[in-house]
Image (tube, grey):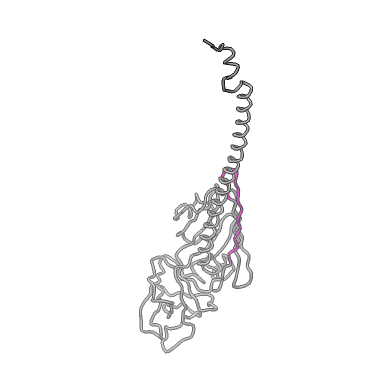
Amino acid sequence: MNRRLPAVENALHPAAGFTLVELVIVITLTGVVVVLASVMVGNQMLGYVDTARRAGLMAKADLALQHIARDLRGAAPYSIRIAGGTALEWVPIQNWGRYRKLPDASEDAALDFSRPDAQFEVLFGSAMPAIASGMQLVIGNTDAAGIDGINLYGDVSSGTLVPAGSNVITPTSVAVGSSGNSITLTPAFQFALASLASRFYLVNGAASYVCTAGAVTRYTGYPLQKTQPVNGAGVPLSTASSALLLDGVSSCQFGYTALDSTYGVVSVQLQLQDGTETVNMTRMITIENRP
C-alpha cells in the first residue's frame, strides 16, 4: 500500500491563520481608526451640544427682552427711571381714557384745573371700567422726575397724581354730556398740569426689574416711592409680588435716553452664561411719553 508521510502532507497543505505580527498590526490599525472616528464623532457631538446650549441661552434672553418691552410699552408717560444701571422701574397703566376739556351745559362736565374738582366727564375706548380699591389717577405727568406736584414720583399729596389712602376714586354713570360717564374724586383734587391730549391714566402702584445675584427679578404692586427702590431684600420690594424673569445672568445693564419731549429709548443689555457658553444680547425699546 502506497501511503504519504504526514510531514509531506503538512507541507503540501499548510494550516490557515495569522501570525502574531499580523495580529498586532491589525489591532493597531483598528485602534487608530476607532480613535480617529471617535474624535471626529465626538467633536461633532460636542459642537451640537454647544450650539444647542447657545441657542437655548439666546432663546431665554430674547424671551426676557420681549417681556420687558411689553411691560415698558404699557408704562405711564415719564414713569421709567433707572438706578445704577441694574434697576429699572416703571408705573404700569391699568386703564386710560380722555377727560372732557371744554365745558358744556353741565357745570361738572369738564375737568377744572383752576380749583379742586370733584367730578368730571370721561371717555373710555370701551365701557366704563371698574376702578379697584387703591387705584390712583395720573394727569399731566412730566419728565421732571421726582419733582413735587408735576411728577408722579414726587409728593403724591398734590399735583399730577391723586393721592391714595383717604382719597377715593369712583366711577359713576350719570347723564352728563355725550358720553354719560364721569369720575368722582373724594375729596376734590386739583391737578397741576393738563394733558396735551386730554388723557388720564389709572395706575395701581409701581413695578421694577432688578438685576442681582445672577438673576433678573420682576417686582410689582408696591406703592410709589420718591427714591427708586433697588434692594430686593428691603422694603418696599421685599413685600411686593416677585417673580424670576431670568437666571444665569452674568451681566446686565439698563439705560434710558430721551429722544424728544414725547419719545425715549430704553436699552437693555444682557449677558447669559451656561458652562463655557456665553451669549450677549441687546434690545432697544422705543417708549412713547405722550402725557
In magenta segment, residue 36: no
Residue at (47% x, 78% y) in the render: 98
Magenta stretch, overall SS: strand
Residue 137 percent coordinates (x, y): 46, 71
**Which segment is the magenta one?**
272-285
Identify which residue, 175 or 274, lies in the foreground. Answer: 274
Residue at the (58%, 41%) spot, across then down: 41
Compared with 211, 4 (above or below) is: above
Q: Position of residue 7 (x, y in %)?
A: 58, 12
- Residue 13 picture quarter: top right
Counting the numbered discs, the total is: 0
Along the line of sight, the residue nearer the viewer: 45 or 210: 45
If the image is split into quadrants, where does the C terminus sit? bottom right
- Left or right position of 129 against 225: left
As drawn, the residue found furthest toward the top would be: 1
The front one of 47 and 218 is: 47
Q: Nearer the viewer, residue 260 or 139?
A: 260
Q: Position of residue 143 (x, y in %)?
A: 59, 69
Q: Is residue 89 above or below residue 272?
A: below
| Residue 268 in which image quadrant | bottom right
In the picture shown, does residue 57 fall above or below 5?
Answer: below
In the image, residue 274 lies in the stretch drawn in magenta: yes
Q: For residue 39, which quarter of the picture?
A: top right
The location of residue 28, given as percent across then percent down, is 63, 28
Task: Name, please, the residue furthest toward the bottom.
Answer: 105
